[in-house]
């Protein structure tokens, strides 16, 4: 049976890294504060926000919800994001996605101040992530994958890695993070003729398709590490891309869902928030 790669172990390591910074900030009267900007009352957004609130409460971090109706005018949303960028009490901004198709996504995202963009919505942070710049805030889910690999000592240099799903939030930025770590990456999509030709050859298989139960025994081989990122809420429950019952007896290691990458993602968000608060408070690099 596969070894389970669990979030709680990884989170302890991340939390230990930021303790000194958080204590220093609070000693100066600064509590890092996140603004969560949400449109409408979609179930997945509400569940994600609930998880963030619980995590922030546990860490002693502050937050506020900025909620608009789903039919909010684009200009009003942009004005709110710009105002949050100017607010000295706000250190991080999280814009729930996807945005309505009627909106100019580029224009809305660029209204977020990059130094407060803790989930890589802006072109600045996406480009900086691709370039491997240390000050960039990568998307939280790809960063969570990299933290998990590092914590469990799973090497990526020179390894063959297959990512199922080429979206902008997980697949593409994660592929670049792995390439920067000198892995050989195959990035598949819905038009890939036979994904199993790539998935079975991989040393590490990562699924971010958002299709519950997609990855079964036909996608894997013995000795692989399988990481499930593609979480979906179905019938009120969190479902992963990986059919654990079929895959667990075959592979060497596996992330569970829940309890895997999704549990690390909110911890990465907290880390980025603390880093942003530190940068805004101590380094005064407001030009980003």
Image: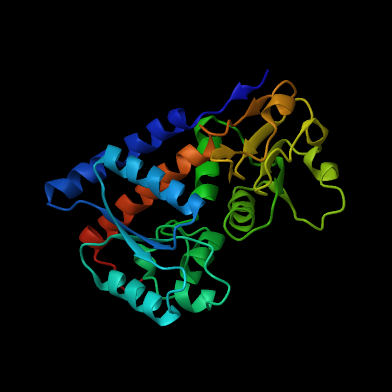
Instruction: Classify residue 205 by image quadrant.
Output: top right
Q: Is residue 103 above or below residue 120?
A: below
Q: Left or right of 68: which side holds 178?
A: right
Residue pictured at 39% horizontal, 38% vertical: 14
Q: Quarter of the image for the C terminus: give it.
A: bottom left
Residue pictured at 63% horizontal, 40% vertical: 156
Please tell me which residue lies in front, 198 or 164. 164
Q: How many marks?
A: 0
Q: Is residue 18 above or below residue 193?
A: above
Please tell me which residue lies in front, 29 or 156. 29
Tell me residue 245's x, y (percent).
70, 25
Instruction: Classify residue 226 by image quadrant.
Output: top right
Residue pictured at 81% horizontal, 58% vertical: 191
Residue pictured at 54% horizontal, 70% vertical: 100
Instruction: Classify residue 176 by image quadrant.
Output: bottom right
Looking at the image, which residue sits at the far bottom?
Answer: 75
The answer to whether residue 26 shows anywhere in this view is yes
Tell me residue 181's x, y (percent).
60, 48
Q: Quarter of the image for the N terminus: give it.
A: top right
Tell me residue 19's x, y (percent).
27, 39
Report the colour scheme.
Answer: rainbow
The answer to whether residue 223 shows anywhere in this view is no
Looking at the image, which residue sits at the far front?
Answer: 235
Tell me residue 120's x, y (percent).
47, 61
Q: Left or right of 163: which side holds 255?
A: left
Q: Is residue 274 above or below residue 79?
A: above
């Amino acid at each position: 049976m596969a070894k389970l790669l669990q979030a709680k172990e990884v989170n302890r390591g991340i939390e230990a890294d930021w303790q000194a910074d958080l204590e220093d900030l609070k000693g100066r009267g600064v509590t890092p504060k996140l603004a969560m900007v949400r449109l409408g009352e979609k179930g997945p957004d509400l569940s994600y926000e609930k998880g963030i609130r619980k995590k922030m409460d546990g860490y002693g971090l502050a937050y506020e919800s900025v909620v608009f109706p789903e039919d909010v005018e684009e200009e009003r949303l942009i004005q709110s994001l710009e105002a949050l960028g100017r607010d000295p009490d706000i250190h991080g901004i999280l814009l729930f996605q996807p945005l309505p198709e009627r909106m100019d996504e580029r224009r809305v995202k660029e209204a977020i101040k990059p130094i407060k963009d803790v989930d890589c919505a802006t072109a600045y942070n996406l480009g900086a992530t691709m370039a491997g710049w240390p000050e960039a805030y990568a998307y939280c889910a790809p960063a969570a994958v990299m933290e998990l690999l590092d914590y469990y000592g799973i090497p990526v240099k020179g390894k063959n890695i297959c990512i199922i799903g080429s979206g902008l939030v997980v697949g593409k930025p994660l592929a670049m993070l792995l390439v920067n770590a000198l892995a050989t990456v195959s990035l598949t999509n819905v038009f890939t003729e036979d994904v199993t030709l790539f998935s079975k050859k991989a040393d590490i298989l990562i699924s971010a398709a958002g299709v519950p139960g997609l990855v079964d025994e036909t996608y894997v081989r013995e000795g692989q590490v399988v990481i499930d990122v593609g979480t979906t809420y179905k019938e009120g429950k969190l479902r992963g891309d990986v059919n654990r019952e079929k895959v667990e007896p075959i592979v060497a290691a596996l992330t569970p869902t829940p309890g895997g990458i999704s549990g690390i993602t909110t911890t990465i968000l907290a880390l980025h928030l603390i880093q942003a608060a530190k940068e805004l408070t101590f380094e005064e690099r407001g030009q980003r």
